[in-house]
Image: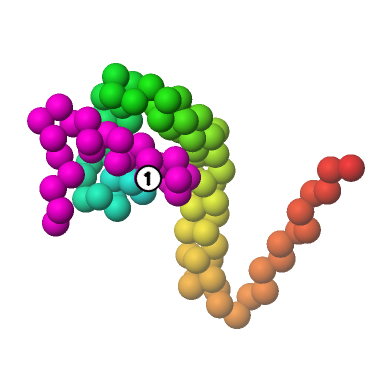
Amino acid sequence: MQEMFSPDGGERCVLLGRCLVEQRLTVRAVAAQFGISKSTVHKDVTQTLRRVNPTLYREVQRVLEVTKQERHLRGGEATKQKYLQKYLQREPHRRLRIPPPEQNG
């Protein structure tokens, strides 16, 4: 693996920040992509990056705010899928009646 670490973490935080912004990823996804902990990614893009590259830091903060606002939606969808799969395994012969989505108008 190519070395992406410097003693002060400056190079790594810029790399992680760019990845997060360009790909619109969550901290968890960036951590998985680079094989490091979520804590390390979060610390790099919120503390170290602020000192090393303030412009990129502001962009990262905007992306983090969006992913934070969407977090409850992702969690709700995951829970829905989990219980849907359990239901379908338990009663595969039954038809599932799902009401149409509400239309705001």
Q: Quadrant of residue 36?
A: top left
Please give the residue where the numbered disc 1 appears in the rendered image.
19
Q: How is the image coloured?
A: rainbow
Note whether 79 is above or below 93 in the view shown. Answer: above
Position of residue 11 relative to residue 99, above or below, is: above
- Foreground of the two, 40 or 77: 40
Quarter residue 11 falls in: top left
Sort mark 1 into few (<14), some (14-19) or many (20+) by Cα contacts within 10 Å.
Answer: some
Amino acid carrying mark 1 in the image? Cys
Where is residue 14 shown, x and y percent of the image?
30, 35
Quarter of the image where the N terminus is located: bottom left
Under tag 1, what secondary structure? helix
Image check: 40 left or right of 104?
left
Question: Number of marks in the image?
Answer: 1
Quadrant of the frame with the C terminus:
top right
Most distant residue in the right direction: 105
- Residue in the image at 51% along x and 46% along y: 74
Residue 52, position as x, y percentages in the image: 28, 24
Residue 53 placement (x, y as % from top left): 34, 25
Q: Which residues are magenta?
A: 1-28
Residue 70 magenta: no
- Residue 38 shows in the view: yes
